[in-house]
Amino acid sequence: LTNVISQGLGLIIGTWVLLSGRSRLHLTLKNFRIDPVMMKRIIKIGIPVAITGAQRSLGDMVIMWFISPFGTAAVAAHTIWQRIMMFNMMPGMGFGTGAAVLAGQNMGADKPDRAERSGWLASGLVVAWMFIGGVLMLIFPEQIIGIFGPDPDVVELGADFLRIGAVALIVFGFEPVLQNVLSGVGDTLSPMVITVGTFWVFQVPLAWALSNFTGLGVYGVRWGIVLGMMASGVGMALAFKSGRWKKKKV
């Protein structure tokens, strides 16, 4: 309920700011009309983004399905791990949004090389942040997990999850930034293919196989997640480095 209320307030305030003229972008309903060509372009760009977001929600449910047979401690440790990883990823989302704006402006000014530099620079800053986060996760895993509760089983599992997750942070740091940059210049298809592909080709099969056919147990799920995250980060970096997005016309 609180999430719905906060989202609703955000929508109301954002709409008011846009309609009131208090922002650089001032929307009015004076000359509002349906533009089929523009709608088609928006749908073409937006559908891959929607699919990417939907598969992440579905992916969380699948991973939880893999983990739940290992008990409540494993579920609790996984949930805490998700929160900590999300905290580490927030700067990536922020820098990614900023880099996407710069990349879009530079592409509009016919300066693709500057757009590329903004993407790599933002990625470097996020990778540095995640490196620090990874080091802290390796050195103080029990203390970090202990913040969320004293249960010894949860702390032990959560600490191990953090150690494993720390391996992926640096490589995965490219993913949230470059996904935003690619989307910002109109290439939403590549991030969708990479995100969906690495999840269902790498992460899900590995998490299932390692947890069921090796002695790793619940740690097999964690290694599957980590390897899938790393594959996604590498894939996003390769897609950005290829430069095909520079030919995109929005």
Image (cartoon, rainbow, N blue to C red):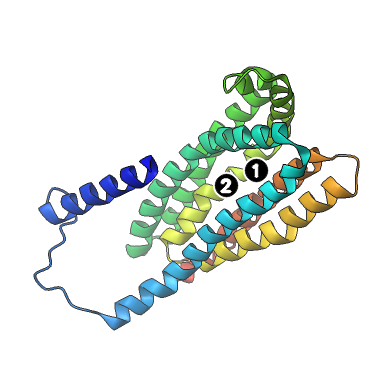
Asked whether residue 154 is in view, the answer is: yes
Residue 167 vs 148, above or below: the answer is below
Residue 240 relative to residue 248: left or right = right
Say which quadrant the C terminus sits in: bottom left
- Residue extending farthest to the left is 30
Circle 1 packing at 10 Å, graded few (<14), some (14-19), many (20+), is some
Tell me residue 11's x, y (percent). 27, 51
* Quarter of the figure with residue 88: top right
In the rendered image, which residue does mark 1 sit on? 171
Q: Nearer the viewer, residue 14 or 111?
A: 14
Query: What's the residue at 11%, 52% (across, down)?
Result: 20
Residue 55 relative to residue 166: left or right = left
Tell me residue 117's x, y (percent). 47, 50
Query: What's the residue at 50%, 48% (across, down)?
Result: 177
Tell me residue 150's x, y (percent). 64, 17
What amino acid is at disc 2? Phe
- Residue extending farthest to the bottom is 36
Q: SS of the residue at dot 1?
A: helix
Please give the label number shown on residue 93.
Answer: none
User: Marks 2 and 1, Cα distance to the nearest angstrom?
Assistant: 6 Å
Residue 174 relative to residue 248: left or right = right
What amino acid is at disc 1? Val
In the rendered image, which residue does mark 2 sit on? 174
Tell me residue 61's x, y (percent). 63, 52
Query: What's the residue at 51%, 34% (across, down)?
Result: 87
Residue 92 vs 111, above or below: the answer is above
Q: SS of the residue at dot 2?
A: helix
Badge 2 vs badge 1, beta-carbon distance below 8 Å: yes
Query: What's the residue at 43%, 55% (across, down)?
Result: 115
* Quarter of the figure with residue 220: top right
